[in-house]
Image (tube, helix red, strand yellow):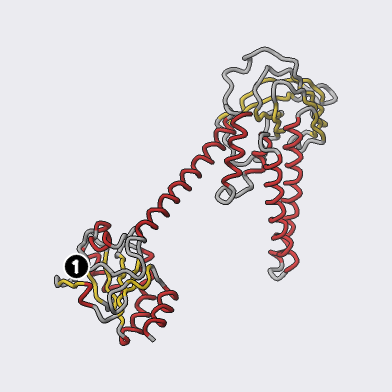
Amino acid sequence: MNTNIRTIIPALLLSACGAGHPGDRTITAHISGGAGQTLYLEKFAANQPVRIDSVKLDGDGKGVLHPVVLPLDFYSLSTGGNDRLVLILDSTESVSFGATAGKLGEPESVTGSAHTTLMHGFFKEMKAYSAERQELIGRINADRNDSAAIARIEQLNTDFYARCRDFVTGNTGSPAVLAAVNNLNIQTDLPLFQQVRDALRLTIPKSEYYIGFRDQVGRMEQQFAAMKAQEEQMARLDNLIPVGSAAPDFTQPTPEGREITLSSLRGKVVLIDFWASWCKPCRMENPNVKRVYERYKGKGFEILGVSLDRDKNAWTGAIAQDGLPWKHVSDLGFWNNAAAQQYGVSSIPYTVLVDKDGKVIAKNLRGPALEEKLAEVLN
């Protein structure tokens, strides 16, 4: 449909083109340059047009369709190619339109259908926005220092986003909002998407356009629920060992088979570093940790690396490859590592900074934040 309704799943397939009985509704067409062509009323199923009705245009490009009674939904008119006029029709409206052959998607006039008029009004706004945006992009590509063009495109994008929101909030129950809502960010505007879904459930509940949109909102709701549950779980685990509490003691074997107990390091500031050879973010963080260790190891600072590996060769290989000179332990229990369970570790890299008396003074410090905290504690 000229991709005007961009990401919406196509509508329900009609059981048969001849089903139903003609109603009083008419679709009156005047297509300049369309003399003798056949005009088809269509619906889409699986991205394929399904023809419902047709009329042969007369010598002036005029014709009248008498479609069967159909539910409120998206339809299109075409002359058999990809040139289409999108309509939102219900069983009570008679529509008249004027267009030019080859440009049906940009009609000169559409009357008789409030939803269609609303939608095409928005299409014109979107076309104007796109044209100006493309012109500005051309200017910026030609001159990366064109500050006026950069400022204008930023403002244009902001204004268009606001216009899409206003269009949706002002016409929530109209199927026409589907032309605008997909220009919005569902993550930041989920409540508005939910409002549209609930309103369209009352107007086009069986439309595949609605069903596709409904499912899109449902998937995002599930993602948000999962994220919230994860945040709550992380907060619960984080509260297992609050800052200021005693760091739980544990003992685990080194690569050489000796055992190290956390409390044996009492008298030093200790960074418990939960990591693994298979954890790419951990490996990327290792050079930063190594740099901090070299700076502070002579000032009473120690690192105890606790690996969540389950393969000893992978673990020791990563230590050698990354050149990690501090103390290392692991029970090779993967996520069931006993120390990780004690400390509520749900993701890695994860760090716990313990003071000389065995008290937790900070958690999950990395990069500059770790260095700043050590400077505060050890300098």
Q: How many marks?
A: 1
Instruction: Please report the residue visible at 74 percent of the width from the left and 64 percent of the height from the top.
Output: 149
Q: Residue furthest top?
A: 21
Q: Position of residue 94 (x, y in %)?
A: 77, 23
Q: Position of residue 247 (x, y in %)?
A: 28, 69
Instruction: Please report the residue visible at 72 percent of the width from the left and 55 percent of the height from the top.
Output: 133
Side of 264 where 231 appears, left or right: right
> Could you say which is closer to the camera, residue 156 or residue 15?
156
Residue 102 visible here: no
Q: Residue 330's image quarter?
A: bottom left
> Could you say which is closer to the camera, residue 69 or residue 39?
69
Side of 63 where 236 appears, left or right: left
> Could you say which is closer to the camera, residue 265 or residue 361?
361
> From the viewer's perspective, is residue 170 above or below residue 205?
below
Side of 242 where 94 appears, left or right: right
For disc 1, the neighbor class at 10 Å (few under 14, some 14 to 19, many from 20) is many
At label 1, the amino acid type is Gln
Quarter of the figure that contains the N terminus: top right
Instruction: Please report the residue visible at 75 percent of the width from the left and 34 percent of the height from the top.
Output: 104
> From the viewer's perspective, is residue 11 above or below residue 311?
above
Q: Residue 378's image quarter?
A: bottom left
Q: Residue furthest left?
A: 257
Quarter of the figure that contains the C terminus: bottom left
Q: Position of residue 229 (x, y in %)?
A: 41, 49
Residue 153 visible here: yes
